[in-house]
Every structure is written in structure tokens, then in C-alpha cells.
Amino acid sequence: MTQRVKIGKRLRELRKSRGLTQQELANMLDVTTSAVGMYEQDRRHPNYKVLIQYSKYFNVSIDYIIIGEENDR
């Protein structure tokens, strides 16, 4: 059984992979910098609209963001 990584860690890794600050990403997602920080600390989870924005911007599936795996179906 594989260990699942928390959503926040994946969101942080995605952001850093593009060399973005939390503030830059927050501006693109139309959320507060505080919200991005809370998502990355797993203190709060993004709503569906924000998950879709993350998915489109970083070109990953929502499955990847939530469970760490791509869904090939």
C-alpha cells in the first residue's frame, strides 16, 4: 500500500515547479495569498472552482491534486 501525500504538499510542489510565489499564484487564481498558504499547509482545502483553476494552470488532473495519481479512464 502506498502512502498518500497530502494535497497541500502537491500544491506547493506545483507552485514551486513554476517558480511562483504564493502571492503570484494567488493573483492568478483570484484568491488571497493567505488562502494559498492555508491550502499548502493543509489548513484549508480549495473549493471546486479553485481546484479546476489549479488543474488547468499546472496541466494536471484533479485526481492528481487530490490523490496523487492520474486517472487514465
Image (cartoon, rainbow, N blue to C red):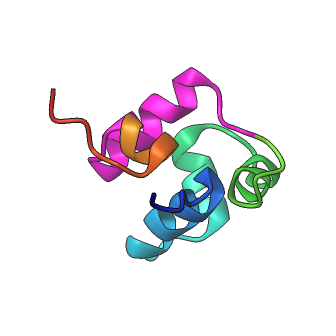
Q: Quadrant of the C terminus?
A: top left
**Picture quadrant of residue 23:** bottom right
Magenta highlight: main SS: helix
Residue 45 screen position, x and y as percent: 71, 38
Query: Which residue lies at the image location 49% right of the left edge and 65% below the top edge?
Result: 15
Q: Nearer the viewer, residue 24 or 14?
A: 14
Query: Which residue lies at the image location 44% right of the left edge and 77% below the top edge?
Result: 19
Query: Which residue lies at the image location 26% right of the left edge and 47% below the top edge?
Result: 59
Would residue 61 be counted in the magenta stretch? yes
Q: Quadrant of the N terminus?
A: bottom left
Query: Which residue lies at the image location 51% right of the left edge and 41% below the top edge?
Result: 66
Residue 61 screen position, x and y as percent: 31, 39
For the record, the magenta segment spans 45-62
Q: How many marks?
A: 0
Q: Nearer the viewer, residue 49 or 1?
A: 1
Residue 50 screen position, x and y as percent: 56, 32
User: Is residue 35 rendered to the left or right of residue 70?
Assistant: right
15 to 58, vertically: above or below: below
